[in-house]
Amino acid sequence: MHATSAAQFASSTTRIAPDLEQVRDDVWALGMPMPGGHIPYSLLYLLRDSADGIHVIDPGWDSKSNLQRVLRALASLGAAATDIRSITATHLHPDHIGMGPRLKQASGAPLQVHATEKEALYARGVGGWSPSVFSHVLDDWGVPANRRAEIEAILSATPPHPDVHVDRVLANNERLDIPGFDLVAMLTPGHTPGHLSLRDDARSIMFTGDHLLPTMHAGLGLGGPTNTNALTDYLDSLDTVSVYPDHEALPGHGYRFSGLAKRAGKSARHHLKRSREVAEVVADSPDSTIWQIAERLTWTAGWNRLEGFFLFSALSQTAIHRDFVAADGLARIAAHHR
Ligand SMILES: [Zn+2]
């Protein structure tokens, strides 16, 4: 993997959102600041079609100042909000879709996501968890009584997904209506169940959202409960994007890069290493609950320091790996190391 933009690469270390940068003749990237400090910015993309219409990919975090930032960027291209013809979000997280409604209001352009993402957005709550289902899950995971309250509290404490009205849904392999572009939506579930990556073969670019990132590995199963295993989905989705190893990756955070397939391989190994760790604990103590497995794993922050949402996230990731290992995970781990 190599950074293909020195400016964006520098931004990933200074943690200051990068300025508008031209990526192709008719494609630009703009860093969008995010609150919280954990991840400093997302990357918004502007496409100019052959009829001078503007198309936005991943509007970014919702704020008045971020809207002004986009309007200034448009002005520098000789365009305005009213030139926006479509707004597409790779997935439902507020650092990607958040400013969608505000941008829609300013432009009148339709907002589009994959159908699964629309469903999850409309389900609201913490990725669609209802309190009764949530309580059942915590029972299932073997969460001790004295730790339940802090996890249950995240249901009410975590702000719901932004109040987003989706105008159009995109299907897997659908070609977006952008004159002069050949942009194809690829369903790449794993990070969220309806995550899209978008590729344009003529320009040899792929918008990878949070599916494939240069500075971190995508978290899994962060779009609400599903019937499929997020890791199985994620590995399949890495294969999906690896069919295009020479496309330049235009990710949702960090910096654009080449070596997309190599990065995908590294992300697979990162997650499978965790699966092996979980498999070892399960082999040693087959009756362990999710809680008992998780407390035997290594955590960057230290198991005893995980609280509230981070504790929930740790348990949820552990459950994904345990279920993966219990299904066909061991065979997939072996296949990956052949
Ligand atoms: Zn995300």
Image: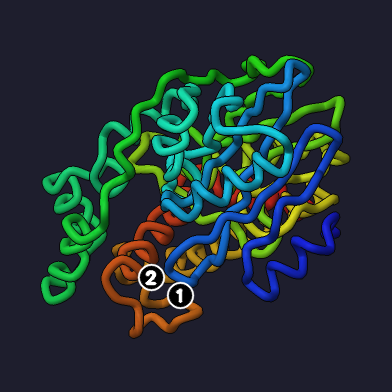
Q: Identify the element where label 1 is drawn.
A: loop
Determine whether the beta carbon of the residue marked 2 sits less than 8 angstroms from the nearest atom of ligand 1.
Answer: no
Q: How many residues crowd around disc 1 within 10 Å: few (fewer than 14), some, or many (20 or more)?
A: some
Q: Is residue 177 above or below residue 203?
A: above
Quarter of image, res 123: top left
Q: Is residue 46 above or below residue 31?
A: above
Q: How many marks?
A: 2
Can the viewer see residue 231 in this picture? yes
Residue 224 or residue 28, whichever sits in front: 28
Q: Identify the element where label 2 is drawn.
A: helix
Q: Is residue 224 left or right of residue 198?
A: left
Look at the image and tell me in which quarter the N terminus lies.
bottom right
Residue at 68% x, 39% y: name it: 207
Quarter of image, res 130: top left
Q: How is the image coloured?
A: rainbow
Residue at 43% x, 64% y: name it: 282
Residue tagged by mark 2? 294
Marks 1 and 2, Cα distance to the nearest angstrom?
5 Å
Identified by mark 1, the residue type is Leu
Q: How many residues crowd around disc 2 within 10 Å: few (fewer than 14), some, or many (20 or more)?
A: many
Residue at 32% x, 70% y: name it: 311
Q: Position of residue 318 (x, y in %)?
A: 41, 61
Q: Is residue 303 left or right of residue 143?
A: right
Residue at 47% x, 36% y: name it: 103
Q: Position of residue 3 (x, y in %)?
A: 82, 59
Residue 118 or residue 295, whichever sits in front: 118
Identified by mark 2, the residue type is Ala
Residue 99 or residue 220, whichever sits in front: 99
> Do residues under tags 1 and 2 come within 8 Å of each other at their CB atoms?
yes
Residue tagged by mark 1? 297
Q: Position of residue 67 (x, y in %)?
A: 49, 47
